[in-house]
Amino acid sequence: GMCYAVVAMSTDYDCWHHSETPVTWEMIAETMKNNVAHVKEIFFGSLKKIDFEDCFCRTAIDAALV
């Protein structure tokens, strides 16, 4: 198996929150650029905490119904 996780970066709220003003592509790109440091911190911080030798992902396929 393979360990994986998802990290989502919210860039704006106008897609669902009606009181928010529309954003431009430039605004979204700037927000993503500013979020890169946070994502790197989460990613590398998480890697330090994973016990790869005792991870369930290594044997998850053993119980798969194929």
Image: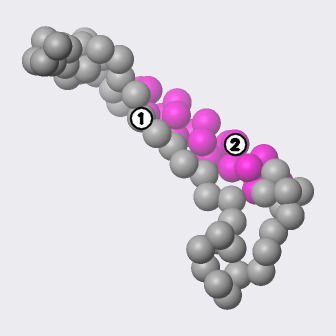
Residue under label 2: 36
The answer for how far apart the CA atoms under marks 2 and 1 are is: 17 Å
Residue in the image at 69% along x and 49% along y: 35
Within 10 Å of disc 2 (Cα), the crowding (few <14, some 14-19, many 20+) is few
Residue in the image at 69% along x and 66% along y: 12
Ranked by sequence position, the earlier of labels 2 and 1 is 1
Q: Amino acid at mark 1?
A: Ala
Magenta stretch: includes residue 34: yes
Q: Position of residue 43 (x, y in %)?
A: 52, 34
Name the quadrant of the N terminus.
top left
Magenta residue span: 30-48
Q: Quadrant of residue 4?
A: top left
Residue in the image at 81% along x and 69% along y: 23
Q: Position of residue 56 (x, y in %)?
A: 20, 22
In the shown orientation, is residue 55 left or right of residue 12? left
In the shown orientation, is residue 62 left or right of residue 30? left
In the shown orientation, is residue 11 left or right of residue 63? right
Mark 1 element type: loop
Q: Position of residue 3 (x, y in %)?
A: 35, 23
Residue in the image at 48% along x and 34% along y: 45
Assign the magenta stretch its main secondary structure. Answer: helix
Dot in front, 2 or 1:
1
Within 10 Å of disc 1 (Cα), the crowding (few <14, some 14-19, many 20+) is few
Residue under label 1: 5
